[in-house]
Structures are given as C-alpha cells and as structure tokens.
Image: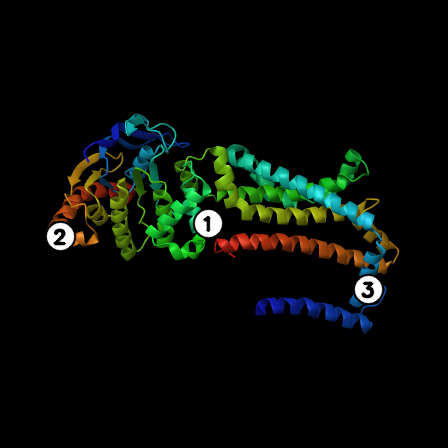
Amino acid sequence: MSRLRLYQIAVVAGFILLLEALCLAGVIDKITMPAPHIILRDFVRMLLAGRYFDEIGKSLLNVLAAFAGAYLAGVIIGTVLHGHRTTRAILDPLFATYYAIPVFAFYPLFIVMFGLGDGPQVLIGFMLAIVAVIITTLNGLDRVPPVLKKTAQVNGLNALQTARHITLPFCAPYLLTAAKLALAYAFIGVIGSEFIMARSGMGYEISYAYTNFDNATMYPLILLILLLSIAANSLLSRWEKMLLARRGQG
Amino acid sequence: MTAAQVTLRGVTKVFPAAAGGNPVHALGPIDIEIRKGEFFAVVGPSGCGKSTLLELIAGLTAPTEGEIEFEGHAIGDNVPDGIGVVFQEDACFPWLNVIENIEFGLRRKAIDANEKSRQAKAVIEMMGLREFARSYPAQLSGGMRQRVCIARTIVAQPRLILLDEPFGALDQQTRLLMGDEMLRLWRQTGATVFLITHALDEAAMLADRIVVMSARPGRTIDLVETNWPRERDSRIVERENFGALTSRLWKTLREESLKTMGRTGNGA
C-alpha cells in the first residue's frame, strides 16, 4: 500500500476516533449524535433485522431509474448536439448556468404535475444528472483527434464503424466520468426530494426518524447512504483509472 | 518502373468560404504522374497545400476540378484499397496495445484472426517492435509510436504509401534513422512511396524524384530527378552532388518561401 493511501486512511480513521472521543467525553451529547461504535452496532442490527429493506430498495430503484434515464438521454443528446453547431451554441448558456438553478425549487410544481408518487423524485434526480452527462459527452467528443477519424477512413470504416471502433473507445473515460457524475446527482436528487415531501424511501425515513429523535434509525440510514454512494463511485473510479492508466494519464 | 500508378490532371482544390471570409484557393491546377515503385517526394513552403494534395490522392477529400486516377481508376469518395497513409500527428489508438494497433491495419483483409495475428507479428519483427508488442502507445516514445503507425500501414501491404511529414515531430537523429528505415521498407515491399515534407535534405536523401511546389495556390514549379541507386541510405548525403541537389531545391523554394513570409509575416 502506498504511503499516500495510508495517510488517506489515517485521516478518515482519525476523524472517526475524534468523534468517538468527543461523544464518550460528553462534548457531543447523546441526543445530537450517538458514538460511532453505537451507530455501527445499530447499523448491523438494522441490516440483520431486515428493517427498511423495502424503503431502501425503493429509493435505490428510483436512483437507478433517474441515473439510467439521465445517462441514456444525456449521451444521446450530447452526441446529437455535437453534430449541430448552431443548436449547441444556442444551448451553451443554459448548460453554463444550469447548476446555478435550484432544481429543488420546482419540486412543488412537479408534485402538482406528477402527483405524490415516485415520479417527482425520479424527475429531480434525472434533471440534476442529465446536463452533467451532456456536457461530459460533448467534452469527450470534442477531443477525438481528427487524425484518428482520417485513419478510420483510410482503413475503410464507414460512419457507424467509426463511431463503434474509434469514437466510442476514445470517449470511454469521459463516458465513465459522466456515469460517476450522473450517479452522484441521481442520489442527491432522489434522496433529497424524499426528504422534503415524499411519503416513503430512505430520505423520508431519515427525516421521520429525525423528527422523532430516533437516532438509532437515523444515523444507520445516513451511514448506509454514505456507504452505497461511495461504493458505487469507487467502482466507477477504478474502471476509469484503469482506462486512463493505459493512456498514461492515470 | 515507368508505368504511371497515380495521375493527376488539372487538379485544383478550393475550400468554400468560412463565415465572413473568401473562398480559399489552396491548390492547383496541378498535373503530376507518379510512377509505379518510385520514391516520390513533394517539397514546398508551408501552407502551399502539400497536405491537401496528399488528402486528394488518398481520396480523403475530393478535388474541386480535375481528375485523379489510381491504377487506372478514378478516385471517388472512398479511400481505395491498396493505399496506405501515415500522418504527421500521432495516430496510434491509445486504447489498443501495439499488436492490436497493427492488426487494425488488416481490417479490410478477408483473413481469419490467426492469419491476422501472424501477419501483424511478421511486421512487428520487421519494424523491431517485438519487445513492445503488448505495450500501450502511452508507454512508447514519439519515434516508437510513429513506427507503430508505419507498421499499421505496411501490414496491409499497400501498393502506394502516402507519408504526410511523418518524421516532422521527431528529433533529427531519429528522423535520419527513420528515413533509412523507410528506404529499407520501400525496397522490401516494392510499394510506391509518396512523401510530403518541408525538409529539403530529407527529400533529397530519400526520393527518386522531387516536385517543388509554389506558394499558395500550390502548383508544381520544378521537378528534380535524383538518379540515386535503389540501394541507398542516409549516407548518400556524403555524395558530391547531394549539395548541388539541395541547393537547386533551395534556390527554387527560397523565392516561394519569401512570398509566403511576406504574406503572413510583416506584410499582413
């Protein structure tokens, strides 16, 4: 293991130990936050008892729906826009300022439009994620060196074969970055909106536990979201790193 | 040796106007005959349309006027089978290793995977790339990457190899050695080689015949026969008449280069 990785682990471990010490010493009182070892115990109990599995499954399904929709639509829109300079130029300011718009502000409107079901939550996750995918796809396509396309022509590849054998593999690291961003935004969008107005899901359960001072539920659920999000992200990062390392950019 | 493999008749290329500009008359009218099996070089001032000329012959772009024939057939919209191109820029595929890059050059051949791998390996040996067969381009030097691109081109056994300043991005020693290598491959494969370069000594050292192009719009203003023996290498520069040859090229080219400088340098 590299020295750097040891330091990274030491920082996280140190932070947890500090929290543990502060909790045990009573600096942080029990109602605000239980000690990390208690959170961990409650977490294991929650998983063993199978509590909230329905809620967790539902939230994850919504995250997946928002992610998949945004990713698919984003890559397609990005690819189409890459071929339409004018349309792209018109939309550029929208993309540039998109993340300054608080999408959550539209949540009440979405509820009016789509009702109280899962629709609004998925839509918010989708909206947060899609533009990051479009921008990253465009970025990748912009960087395909013209000489590689010429090489494809010289080797008799048609447009479809060029897309499959040249453009796609060249853009693969960008498409993985897009997936990483989309997944993170889908998590934020879905869990966040469950927090505000939904009647079910992990976000809702956290918020419900919060209003009832139920720390034994709230903290394990927060921990679960953290772990899921980090696990998914590091999986994609590993893959991305492997591709980039081949290109001497790792 | 005398049969024409490539014929250009009255070829011009005019690029349509960009927004707010005028159309650019890049090339021609130009008439050239390239003989089968010869090493043919084109030199010219920068911006004279040398690369455009190469793309026209390759079928990567269509002429505005005139005709181009390769082995008796007009070159249409597609790159004809039998033509290989090596570009100046790094054209290795970074996601494929060396052997996969080279096998890519066999895409047009109707042969099975075993035969592909056998032919790729043979070229890897020929180019001295054996110990790098499983390396990715990012692990190789610029000169090595260019060898991979050359290998990817010759593995398809093209009858005409077009080289667009292939050594332009390399250091001087590597350039000379790659020149030797090109001469060796030219003799071994029996292919015709068409080389675009801005380096007079490179053209004088490598080619049987050299065309000098004018400033834009590029036209041919001189055609020089070197009369070198087929068996030759970079030591040909020691010959007495090498100096006379390069100075003849430079005399013609100097005027044209000054025109270009005047237009793009202090003049504009």
Give the distance between the C-alpha atoms of the residues marked 2 and 1, in whole angstroms. 42 Å
> What percent of the width, then of the height, locates residue B259?
23, 40
Q: Residue at x 78, y 47 (%)?
A: A57
> What percent of the width, then of the height, locates residue A100?
65, 46
| Labelled pair 2, 1 in contact (Cβ < 8 Å) | no
Query: On the image, which quarter does residue B103 sit in?
Result: top left
Kind of residue at disc 1: Pro
| Labelled pair 3, 1 in contact (Cβ < 8 Å) | no
From this viewpoint, which residue is outermost toward the left? Answer: B240
> What percent of the width, then of the height, locates residue B86?
34, 43
Give SS at disc 1: loop
Location of the N terminus of chain B by quadrant is: top left
Residue B267 in sight from this viewpoint:
no
Residue behind mark 3: A41
Residue behind mark 2: B239
Q: Chain of mark 2?
A: B
Residue behind mark 1: B94
> What percent of the width, then of the height, locates residue A27?
80, 71
Give the distance between the C-alpha atoms of the residues marked 2 and 3, in whole angstroms. 87 Å
